[in-house]
Amino acid sequence: GVVVWGAAGDGGHPLRRMQQLQNVRMLLGSDSSFTAVLEDGEVVAWGNPNTPLTSYNHERMRTVQQIRASDYAFAAVLSDESVITWGHHSFGGNSSSVQEQLKNVLELVSSQRAFCAVKRDGSVVTWGDPNSGGDSSKVQHQLRRVQKVVSSYDAFAAILLDGSVVTWGDERSGGDNCQSHLRSVQEIAASGAAFAAILADGRVETWGDDRYGGDCSSVKAQLLDVQTICGSAGAFAALRRGGQVTTWGGADYGADSSRVQGQLKKVQQIHSTFHAFAAILENGSVVCWGDADSGGDCSSVSDQLVDVLHISSTGGAFAALLKDGSVVTWGNPDHGGDSSSVQHLIRCL
C-alpha cells in the first residue's frame, strides 16, 4: 500500500481510493504530484491538477522499467526500451516530435521542463522546453559515447567515455558548453544552476552561476580526495576521503557549515533539501545544517535519530529510515516534515 503526508495540494492528501492502491510496482513524485504504476498496469496520479494523466494501454504500462519526472510531466522507459510520456506539454509531457528516435533507451534524466534519453549506442535524444535543455541540436555532434547525464534546473551535463564533458541548456544554469578542458571526469553533481565535477585524482572543477555553487575558489585547497558531492538548490557539500565535509555556494542554500564542522567527522552519506543538508555519521547519528525551516535543524528529533540507515528528502524536509524500520521526519510540515498523523502506518517499513 501507499501512505502519504504533507501539503494536500502537492500530493500529501490521501485519495478517496487510496485503500485500493495495492500491489504498487513503481512510485514517483514530480514537483507537486505522484504517479503510481500498479502490477496490473493501471496508472494512478494525484496531487497538483496541472499534472494531467494521459491514459495508456494497461498492457504497455505493465512493462515500465523506469520513470522520471520534470516539474509537471512524466516519462517512462518500457521493457522494449521505448519511451512514453504524459503530463504538461510545456514540461516535456509530449514527446511526439522525437518519438521515432526514442528506441533502445537505457536511461532518462529530467530538468525542470525537459527530458534527456540516453540510448544504448551512447547517443542522446532530448525534448521539452529548449530553455531548459530540451534542444541539444547545437551539441548533438559531440554527444557520442555518453556514459552519464546529470541535470541542473535548466541544463544538462553529459560525461563521455573519454572523461570529457558536454553541456547544453540555459547558459546561466551551467549549459554554456565551455568545459572542453575537462578530462578524466568521474562524477558530476548539480545544484539548481551549477555543476561540480570530480576528477580521477579527487580534485573538483565547477561551473555555472557563482551564486549557486559555480565558483569553488574559496575552498579549492580543501577539495582534495573528494569521494562524492551532494547539491542543494544553490550549494554543494563534498564528502572527502576520511569522512570530512567541505561546503560552498549560496549562503541561503546550506553553503555555511561552520556551525557544525566540529561534528562532521566520519561522515558516510550526505543528503539535501533545497536549502539544507543532512549527513549520516558512521555511528548512525545525523548532523544537519542550513535553513532550519527546510530541515537544517534536527534538534527536535535528534534523540530519535539513532541507527539511521538512509535519508530521503523533499524540497523542504527530510525523512530518515532507522535500522528498526521506523521513520523520523523533520523540516517544513507542508513538505513532509511532520508525519505524526501517519506514524502508526510507517513504523515498520
Image (tube, helix red, strand yellow):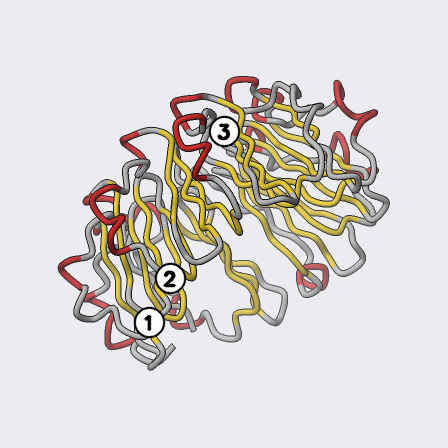
The answer to whether the residue labelled 2 contacts the one labelled 1, judged by CB atoms less than 8 Å apart, is: yes
Q: Say which of 142 and 19 sits in front.
A: 142
In this picture, residue 345 sits left or right of residue 161: left
Which mark, by number, is residue 194? 3
* Looking at the image, residue 174 lies above or below residue 246: above
Q: Quadrant of residue 285?
A: bottom left
Select label 2 or label 1 by which is in front.
2
Mark 2 residue crowding within 10 angstroms, few (<14) / some (14–19) / many (20+): some
Residue drawn at x 69%, y 57% is: 57
Residue bearing the label numbered 1: 283
Residue type, mark 2 in image = Lys
> Percent position (x, y) of residue 181?
69, 24
> Percent position (x, y) of residue 102?
79, 42
Q: Secondary structure at mark 2?
A: loop
Residue drawn at x 37%, y 53% is: 313
Residue drawn at x 37%, y 68% is: 282
> Percent position (x, y) of residue 322?
33, 74
> Percent position (x, y) of residue 193?
47, 27
* Looking at the image, residue 185 lies above or below residue 65: above
Which mark, by number, is residue 345? none
Name the residue at the right extreme. 121
First of labels 2, 3 by sequence position: 3
Residue type, mark 1 in image = Asn
The answer to whether the residue labelled 2 contacts the one labelled 3, judged by CB atoms less than 8 Å apart, is: no
Mark 1 residue crowding within 10 angstroms, few (<14) / some (14–19) / many (20+): few
Q: Secondary structure at mark 1?
A: loop
Q: Whole-Å distance between the Cαs marked 2 and 1? A: 8 Å
Q: Whole-Å distance between the Cαs marked 2 and 3? A: 27 Å
Q: Say which of 189 and 60 sits in front.
A: 189
Name the residue at the left extreme. 300
Residue bearing the label numbered 2: 266
First of labels 2, 1 by sequence position: 2
